[in-house]
Amino acid sequence: MSKPIVAIVGRPNVGKSTLFNQIGKRRVSIVDDFPGVTRDRIYMDAEWLNHTFTMIDTGGIEFVDDDHILKSMRQQAMVAMEEADVIVFVVDGRAGVTTADQEVARLLRSTKKPVILAVNKIDSPQLEPAIYEFYNLGLGDPIGIAASNSLGLGDMLDAVVAAFPQESDEIKEDDEISIAVIGRPNVGKSSIVNALIGEERVIVSNIPGTTRDAIDTHFVADGMKFMLIDTAGMRRKGKIDEAIERYSVMRSLRAVDRADVVLMVINAEEGITEQDKKIAGYAHESGKGVVIVVNKWDVFPDKDDKSTLRFTEDLRDELGFLQYAPVLYTSALTHQRISRITALVKYVADQQSMRIQTSVLNELIRDAVSVNPPPAHRGKKLKIYFMTQADIQPPKFIIFVNDPELMHFSYLRFIENKLRDSFGFEGTPLKLIVRGRKEDEDY
């Protein structure tokens, strides 16, 4: 089941990013302390009252001149209405209702999507009467907040989670592997889908945005059942500004949530972009299996072993947090290596479900400590008592030590590398959790 998506919208300088960051300080549920994961986020996974959801920070509407105001607002509001489950409309309580607020409100009223009206900068009782002016927007009861110091955020989040859609059952068989095909527009996602299923189920075009909605396709290959989640429609036709690009990641995030394995499709001619890093980072943090598919390799110049190795090294440098992901060079046009995708997806799915006995893990820990003893900090030495596997998809390991604060991220990375060297875990992130335990406690 995909997590609900909450989009924060509004004009510049009303406090959208402050609200986003303030919630993130206390409510972000997915955390990765390893360096290399992109921190320039426009999304985060948050939790409130046992509800997990994805929150999108959309950025402000930049006004160039009067000719662009309505067009820019209409573009942002329409995309938000299409993609988000709940919209948080942030306005400035000190400035009062503006013409820009009225125009966005008019568009939001035309949709059936729930809208939470957050009146920001209400940081004192004297300013509370300013809230009532915003009833004129016709979006229900406005909620006064002060994002800078978290005032009213609880009431706002209560309203957000109360508006979430009811959960529905996903149409997916137990033995079926779900694959999300993600990437920027025009990298060949629909062509890869068509090549995999062997028929023209998705319209292929070199115009970004041809496919509007994600399309689930069930098929069988080599005796295995798969479900493809195609996310080709990440943009609309024509010129797309930065603000709309921020909204365009929503469909990919939703597809990643539903997937077992993610195909990260990259255009060989363009290489890695910031958008690729953001979506790939989300897949990594969500614990999904990842296969990097470099498409349009047939038109890449100098396709010798050295250039392939150099391209792979560049990918590893740009996507430092995906060192474990296998890379496959394909051409959807000529079907080069397309047949290898399902076998590789099946392999990654198996790696995600691998379980290691505790006795074997503890033998690995003993060997690791003998080869590379844990460093001491301020005269106190880290002691590792034992490690056990707690979960799969992704594999999760709990390491019991004398003091979790003594576990440096570099030594934790060393243990992860030992796990991968010994057991593979190719294509899947590993979750390593460090817990304190006294030496004389019963195990």
Image (tube, rainbow, N blue to C red):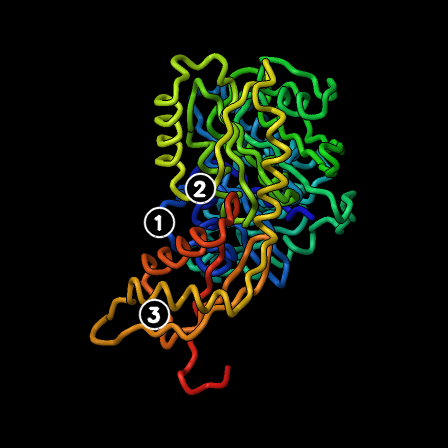
Instruction: Tell me the residue at 64%/33% (across/down).
Output: 342
Instruction: Tell me the residue at 67%/34% (across/down).
Output: 229
**Alpha carbons under labels 2 and 3: distance apart:** 26 Å
Residue neighbourhood size for the residue with mark 2, other residues' Cα within 10 Å, grouped as few (<14), some (14–19), many (≥20):
many
Front of the two marks 2 and 3: 2
Can residue 161 be seen?
yes
What is the three-letter code of the residue carrying label 1? Pro
Give the mark, 2 or 3, whose residue is nearer the N terminus: 2
What is the three-letter code of the residue carrying label 3? Glu
Task: Indicate which disc residue 193 carries.
Answer: none
Q: Position of residue 387 (x, y in %)?
A: 47, 69
Residue neighbourhood size for the residue with mark 1, other residues' Cα within 10 Å, grouped as few (<14), some (14–19), many (≥20):
few
Viewer-closest of 82 and 39: 39
Viewer-closest of 40 and 23: 40
**Alpha carbons under labels 1 and 3: distance apart:** 17 Å
Instruction: Tell me the residue at 60%/47% (across/down).
Output: 117
Task: Indicate which disc residue 322 carries.
Answer: 2
Q: What SS does tag 3 mark?
A: helix
Asked whether, in this view, residue 86 is left or right of residue 95, the answer is right
What is the three-letter code of the residue carrying label 2? Leu
